[in-house]
Image (cartoon, rainbow, N blue to C red):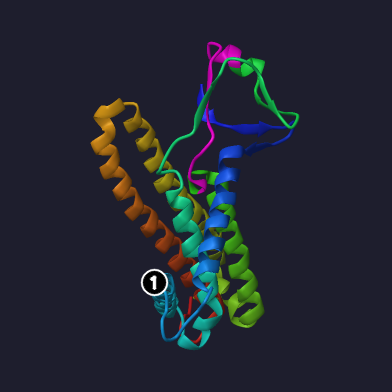
Amino acid sequence: MHEFAKLKFEHFEIDISALLAIIITCLIVFIVARLAVRNLSLDNPSKLQNFMEWVIEFVHNLVAGTMPLKKVAAFVSLAFTLIFFIFVANLLGLPFVIGTEHTQELEVMGAVIVSEADLAAHDGSVHLNWWKSPTADLSVTFGLATMMFLLIHFLGVKMNRKHYFEHYFKPFPIFFPLNLLETIVKPLTLGVRLFANIFAGEVLISTILMLSWFGIPLLAVWQGFSIFVGAIQAFLFTILSMVYISQAIVHEETEH
């Protein structure tokens, strides 16, 4: 049996590997952001300060490409947090794999991780992975997509109520079902796209590791490519989120 470690309660499960990775991701983002704003200087900025200024400028331009300039400032912090968090989360599963082999029942905090039924169903040996990129978990990517879905429509109602509700019936009222379907599909595509790319990359890494030392050169090449994929996926999730926000709050420039 080869699966990720989960706390199994009576009515739900908690993926330990995803939870640990989310906590580590939050800590990395917080620490880097905190270090970047420490000892700020106009005359002699540090290399980290220069780098973060470049990132902020990049994010500002990204948001500016999706909505009028007068609305950009309000969403730069959100876009920066999204792209930074998702990029770090995408990369966490690349450096190493943590796995354990179990031939007996395993419980943590009263919750079953490996049961007798698991052992019996898999010849008495259960292999657990304790580490992965959080975005390789569908519940995490759908959680991010759902958060953006709720925020988008909250902002649409708050900042553009009249035109926000009108757009569901354009260009004709008969298009209401299609417009509603489009609204529902948006978070699904955000979550599935991010999950599928990161999960597929980690599956391939696990497959390469099975090749022993023969797979080391291929693993190095793939991990380098995975960094590129992780950056692209963070960029796509963020820019699409900004586009959807713009469509919800802007009606003069974006009729839909």
Which residue shows up at 40% across the image and 43% down it?
Answer: 95
Residue 167 screen position, x and y as percent: 55, 75
Which residue shows up at 56% across the image and 43% down it?
Answer: 18
Q: Residues within 10 Å of mark 1 (few under 14, many from 20)?
A: few
Residue 166 screen position, x and y as percent: 59, 77
Tell whether 185 sits left or right of 117.
Answer: left
Q: Quadrant of residue 87?
A: bottom left
- Report helix, strand or loop for mark 1: helix
Amino acid carrying label 1: it is Lys
Viewer-closest of 176 and 208: 208
Which residue shows up at 58% across the image and 32% down it?
Answer: 5
Residue 60 screen position, x and y as percent: 44, 78
What number of labels is visible?
A: 1
Residue 128 sits inside the magenta stretch: yes
Residue 63 sits inside the magenta stretch: no
Can residue 170 be seen here? The reply is no
Is residue 70 shown above or below 219?
below
Viewer-closest of 130 and 167: 130
Residue 200 screen position, x and y as percent: 39, 41
Can residue 53 be seen here? The reply is yes
Q: Quadrant of residue 206?
A: top left
Which residue shows up at 52% across the image and 74% down it?
Answer: 37
The residue that disc 1 covers is: 47
Viewer-closest of 89 and 24: 24
Is residue 93 shown above or below 120?
below
Residue range corresponding to the magenta coloring: 119-134
